[in-house]
């Protein structure tokens, strides 16, 4: 008869040999039950199942070698059973944990999701950020006029910082929105690589000035000393010797920026076309600024139609920018962030549970824990939509909620 340590070693060897199949079965049952039903298989059931399967394995070993049961004593069998139970319970716990963490819904986008290279991520204020730059030539969008040379040059030199903790698809959407807003483009297509280099195709602005003028207003350009920081959308006062005209800023350009742009471009000046109908050269396409850098320049304001002629016939003494008070929308964003909520844009996909239904029928708030703040359908906005508002494929939903709830809602809807 072998010594006690040798019998223990034989028992461990026998337990590992006969415990592989029970462990695999235990892991499978634990994973499937947790993933499908969310229920954990009781440990007692795992013990009974593992012992039964191990007994079958031991019986097969005995049939293959009859001396197996004759030479095995109580110590060896006891150690083997303990080893089988330990392996099976560990495998069951691992399968149960994996079933709880495994995503419930897999999508092609999730499997092929691109990520940014860690080399381009910078730390700023404790958070990672990435600087997006335009790579290569700026392409034209099919069906639109070609992009002016000056605008193409500005786009090639454009760069901006964005948070690095968002998927590349979401980052492409943010870059697209930033370019469309900053340059007032009709359409933008952006593709990012792993080093945050953007391949851009754009459509030039179509009716950029006219669509920013409210009904009943007229746009008038006046020269003057531009206050530093003036931007489109600000409320300005144009002071003349006779009266003061009030209106919204729709465009502005400083002489300093115009001179710098003219000096940076070599060769003949950039023009809208070769010549005007009377043979004179067309005006230069010097870009307008999103924010004034101060100094002399020209300001275009939308004033009442009745005061257009008198303003054109007057001399402008100075320009003033009026206070618009506290921006309530920014206060709302600050309060939401303090509460741990975030706002995200989600595009409705073809196979999502929201497409073709109303917000109330989809039970967005009860099912996903998010609230729809606005819906954009083919360029038309609907703020604070009611439960009867329909949602179609391709609509942009602006929702607010906790980050985990927003991620789950995006995964289900998009």
Image: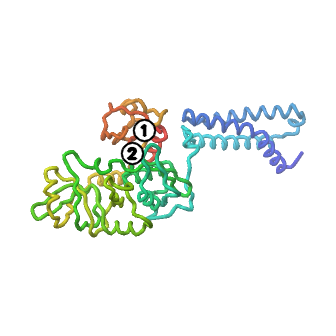
Marks 2 and 1: CB-CB under 8 Å? Answer: yes
Distance between the alpha carbons at the discs numbered 2 and 1: 9 Å
Residues 19 and 288: in front is 288
Residue sitting at the far front: 279
Residues 289 and 105: in front is 289
Q: Position of residue 156 (x, y in %)?
A: 47, 59
Mark sitting on residue 368 = 1
In the image: residue 190, left or right of residue 285: right
The residue depicted at 40 percent of the width and 32 percent of the height is: 362
Residue on which disc 2 sits: 401
Residues 11 and 94: in front is 94
Q: Position of residue 217 (x, y in %)?
A: 20, 49
Q: Position of residue 277 (x, y in %)?
A: 32, 52
Can residue 38 be seen here? The reply is: yes
Q: Is residue 409 above or below residue 129?
A: above
In the image: residue 230, left or right of residue 77: left
The residue depicted at 33 percent of the width and 69 percent of the height is: 256
Q: Position of residue 186 (x, y in %)?
A: 39, 47
Mark sitting on residue 319 = none
């Amino acid at each position: 008869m072998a010594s006690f340590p040798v019998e223990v070693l034989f028992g461990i060897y026998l337990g590992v040999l006969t415990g592989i199949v029970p462990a695999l079965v235990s892991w499978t049952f634990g994973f499937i039950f947790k993933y499908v039903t969310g229920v954990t298989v009781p440990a007692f059931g795992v013990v009974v199942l593992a012992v039964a399967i191990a007994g079958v394995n031991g019986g097969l070993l005995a049939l293959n070698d009859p001396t197996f049961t004759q030479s095995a004593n109580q110590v060896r069998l006891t150690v083997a059973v303990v080893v089988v139970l330990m392996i099976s319970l560990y495998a069951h716990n691992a399968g149960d944990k994996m079933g709880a963490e495994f995503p419930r819904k897999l999508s092609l986008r999730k499997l092929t999701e691109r990520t940014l290279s860690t080399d381009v991520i910078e730390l700023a204020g404790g958070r990672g950020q990435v600087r997006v730059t335009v790579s290569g030539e700026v392409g034209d969008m099919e069906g639109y006029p070609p992009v002016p040379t000056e605008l193409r040059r500005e786009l090639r030199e454009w760069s901006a910082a964005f948070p690095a903790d968002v998927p590349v698809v979401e980052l492409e959407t943010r870059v697209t929105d930033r370019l469309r807003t900053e340059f007032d483009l009709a359409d933008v297509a952006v593709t990012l690589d792993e080093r945050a280099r953007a391949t851009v195709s754009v459509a030039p602005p179509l009716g950029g000035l006219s669509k920013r003028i409210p009904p009943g207003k007229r746009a008038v350009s006046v020269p003057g000393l531009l206050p530093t920081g003036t931007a489109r959308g600000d409320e300005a006062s144009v002071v003349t010797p006779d009266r003061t005209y009030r209106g919204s800023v729709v465009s502005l350009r400083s002489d300093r920026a115009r001179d710098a742009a003219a000096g940076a471009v070599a060769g003949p000046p950039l023009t809208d076309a070769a010549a005007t109908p009377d043979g004179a050269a067309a005006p230069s396409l010097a870009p307008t600024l999103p924010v004034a850098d101060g100094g002399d320049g020209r300001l275009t304001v939308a004033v009442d139609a009745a005061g257009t002629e008198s303003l054109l016939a007057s001399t402008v003494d100075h320009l003033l920018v009026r206070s618009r008070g506290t921006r309530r929308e920014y206060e709302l964003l600050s309060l939401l962030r303090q509460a741990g909520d975030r706002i995200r844009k989600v595009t409705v996909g073809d196979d999502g549970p929201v497409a073709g239904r109303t917000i109330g029928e989809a039970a967005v708030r009860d099912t996903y824990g998010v609230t729809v703040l606005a819906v954009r359908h083919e360029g038309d906005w609907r703020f604070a939509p009611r439960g009867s508002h329909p949602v179609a494929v391709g609509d942009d939903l602006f929702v607010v909620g906790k980050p985990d709830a927003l991620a789950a809602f995006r995964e289900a809807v998009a």
